[in-house]
Amino acid sequence: MRGTITRREFSKVLISGIAGTALGVFGGAGRAFGASRQVVVVGGGFGGATTAKYLKKLDPSISVTLVEPKAAYVTCPFSNWVLGGLKTMSEITVTYSHLSAGYGITVIAESAKSIDALASTVTLGSGRVLHYDRLVVSPGIDFKWGAVEGYSRSIAESMMPHAYQAGTQTELLRKQLLDMKDGGTVLICPPANPFRCPPGPYERASLIAHYLKERKPRSKIIILDAKEKFSKQALFSKGWAALYPGMIEWRGSTAGGKVLRVDPVAMSVMTEPGEVRADVINVIPPQRAGQIAVDAGLADAGGWCPVNPLSFESTIHPGIHVIGDACYAGPMPKSGFVASSQGKVAAAAIVRLLRGQDPVPPSLVNTCYSLIGPGYGISVAGVYRLSSEGIAEVPGSGGLTPIDADAEFLEQEAMFARAWYRNIVADIWG
Amino acid sequence: MPLTNKHLLTVCFITVSALMATTSPALAGKISRTGSSAKVSPRGQMLALSCSGCHGPDGKSAGIIPSIYGKSTEYLETALREFKSGVRASTVMGRHAKGYSDEDIHLIAEYFGALGKKTR
Ligand SMILES: Cc1cc2nc3c(=O)[nH]c(=O)nc-3n(C[C@H](O)[C@H](O)[C@H](O)COP(=O)(O)OP(=O)(O)OC[C@H]3O[C@@H](n4cnc5c(N)ncnc54)[C@H](O)[C@@H]3O)c2cc1C
């Protein structure tokens, strides 16, 4: 059974244990009724900042501490727009001042160094120890360094940026594009699934093409893909043919796309048919849950964190909720929108768990816009519920921009993309 | 709180003020929150939390995406049902509205209808 469930079916889910034994409804009652109600949130990105804010919106009496080393967070959403020259870095940078001043959240500008799940404590880089009644971990991704031969953190920081965590990486890739000669070649090398923002590399190709078409029209983009197909493929292919004919070439993994190794000195990528030289090389390496989640024992052998979909509480360590890119969430893509939706569900669940109540069955959602050109947007939408098999898409809902959408529709989607960004940033950090 | 542990899976009704998002907790003490007559279900709140990801905090939108905040329950319920059936044209709302039952739609509409009334 997929999709919506009745209350009776939902009780079955609970009893059958599919929703997890670490549910916290029964087992967690001990941690529920204490006078102290301290929630610590690790990570102030899309997932963590949302949880912190919504905990306070739903129950201002809970004390909420947000641990995030960056004073200014650069959003990955719209960082491709920066690469295309459509946005500036400052337009995609947010701070935590409103969360602390407006919502009474204690924001600590440090990294969490370790988590002791038995003692319910988080130790910060400075050595300071925070106690929690419930902990939320939303550290995003880290890269599997070593998965691509020849590629490393220092190569990413100097020669071949991944630009898959926004900030200095975005600036480095943008600078390389600006410095490139007309007639140059840009390589984009996306990883196999699962990874952060499945349409991200293809929106990136689109907006780099937009820049090159205007400024360096003899240049070319080649996507060397570890996959045989990709997100919104038909819509992207149609958009590329319409806006950038001949400029973007996509090679699937068995058609020469598979990256065997990279050579930063020669500025080349080795593939099965041979070596591909380029002027700008963007390697997006395979990913896993952020390091702190792995160190805390929250991830499994696959590199991501299993959770109870009712509350996003870890099925490994009760009392710790893992949300966003770091967790397994069935068919939900790893997007900022999803991380934020999960953050709200986790916040609502934590408020109830701290009162000794059971969480309400989750309602989850995603909307991801991709921009192909300034007036050409496409989207994917999804509505998700708990089913007896875990998180499932509600049948008949969601889906892609229609493939036969007309120019007006596509232009509206581009306009809605801009409006979406403004509203979600306000919803999370405003 | 009228909720008890005993009603583990019962959808209980509690006052809007106890559950609903407030614009700023700092102001919460100054806004009269008790005695509100409108009721929302925790289920309604859960469903409604999804909307702000596009429509802005508490449904207050800054750009061309329409605000939900301040719209009546009747208006929102009609609009969502029309998006769902396709009577009302949309880019993305039809795809979303199809994910909700008529009862869900009623709960969402009721939540935002009450939210707009509370602080207007
Ligand atoms: C190019 C690109 C484009 C994208 N476009 C979109 C889009 O249009 N729409 C969309 O919805 N999504 C988009 N995404 C995806 C989106 O960025 C991620 O899915 C989202 O950021 C995930 O949120 P998160 O909270 O899991 O992680 P993040 O947002 O990465 O936040 C994690 C935070 O945790 C902090 N942190 C890590 N470790 C620690 C520690 N030990 N202690 C304290 N803090 C720590 C980090 O500093 C970081 O700020 C895009 C991604 C990319 C790369």
Image (tube, coloured by chain):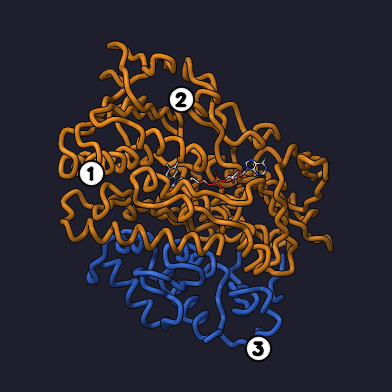
Chain colours: A orange, B blue
Residue A281 shows in the view = yes
> Splitting the image into 4 quarters, where does residue A297 fall?
top right
Q: Which amino acid does label 2 sit on?
A: Met
Q: What residue type is labelled 3?
A: Gly
Same chain for marks 3 and 1? Answer: no
Q: Does the residue labelled 1 lie within 8 Å of ligand 1?
A: no
Residue density around tag 2, few if under 14, some if 14–19, many if 20 or more, within 10 Å: some
Name the residue tied to disc 1: A214
Residue located 38% across and 30% down the image: A190
- Viewer-nearest residue: A196 or A153: A153
Left or right: residue B50 compared with residue A107: left
Q: Which of marks 3 and 1 is in front?
A: 1
Residue located 31% across and 39% down the image: A208
Q: Which numbered dot is residue B35?
A: 3
Location of residue A101 in the rendering, given as x and y in whole percent from the top left corner:
67, 67
- Viewer-nearest residue: A10 or A122: A122
- Say which chain tag 3 marks: B
User: How many angstroms separate mark 3 from mark 1 (CA)?
Assistant: 61 Å
Q: How many marks?
A: 3
Q: Which numbered dot is residue A106?
A: none
Q: Which numbered dot is residue A159?
A: 2
Location of residue A171 in the rendering, given as x and y in whole percent from the top left corner:
46, 40
Q: Which amino acid does label 1 sit on?
A: Glu
- Say which chain tag 2 marks: A
Residue A309 vs A116, above or below: the answer is: below
